[in-house]
Amino acid sequence: MPPGTGQLVAEVEQLLTRGVAVRFIYADPTTVLEWFRMTIAPELPRLRRLGQIELNVLKQADHTFTQLRDQAQVVDLVSDWLARCT
């Protein structure tokens, strides 16, 4: 487990118990997604029992979502998320 994982998971847990909805959007393949898989992903089943948390992975996107199709997908995901959270 990478350093700081316990603190990070605890902070996500605090958000969820306060009723904050959390959505992670990652490009694949990226090192940031791998970091997520090593830190938060193992805790997802437990965290999902605490509140609304989702993960979306955009295949073949770069880490800044440069392509317009990837940007549109991010906008759609965030718009959908906001509509369900309000």
Image (cartoon, grey):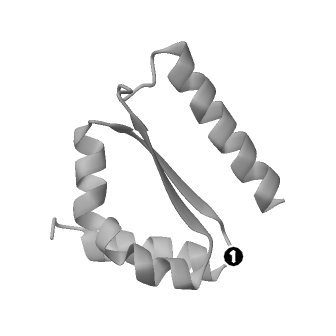
Residue ID for mark 1:
19
Residue 27, quarter of the rendered image: top left
- Mark 1 is surrounded, within 10 Å at the Cα level, by few (under 14), some (14 to 19) or many (20 or more) other residues, namely few
Q: Quadrant of the C terminus?
A: bottom right
Residue 69, quarter of the rendered image: top right
Q: Residue at x 66, y 42 (%)?
A: 78
Q: Position of residue 61 (x, y in %)?
A: 39, 27
Q: Quadrant of the N terminus?
A: bottom left
Q: Residue at x 66, y 69 (%)?
A: 20
Q: Position of residue 23 (x, y in %)?
A: 56, 56
Which one is in front, 34 or 9?
Answer: 34
Q: Amino acid at mark 1?
A: Gly
Residue 65, placed above or below residue 26: above
Image mark count = 1
Q: Position of residue 51 (x, y in %)?
A: 61, 78
Q: Residue at x 73, y 46 (%)?
A: 80
> Is 8 on the left-hand or right-hand side of 55?
left
> Is 57 on the left-hand or right-hand side of 21?
left
Residue 46, placed above or below residue 54: below
Q: Residue at x 33, y 66 (%)?
A: 41
Residue 38, placed above or below residue 47: above
Extreme residue toward the right, this view: 86
Residue 8, placed above or below residue 61: below
Q: Position of residue 57 (x, y in %)?
A: 43, 44
Task: Give SS at disc 1.
Answer: loop
Extreme residue toward the front, this view: 59
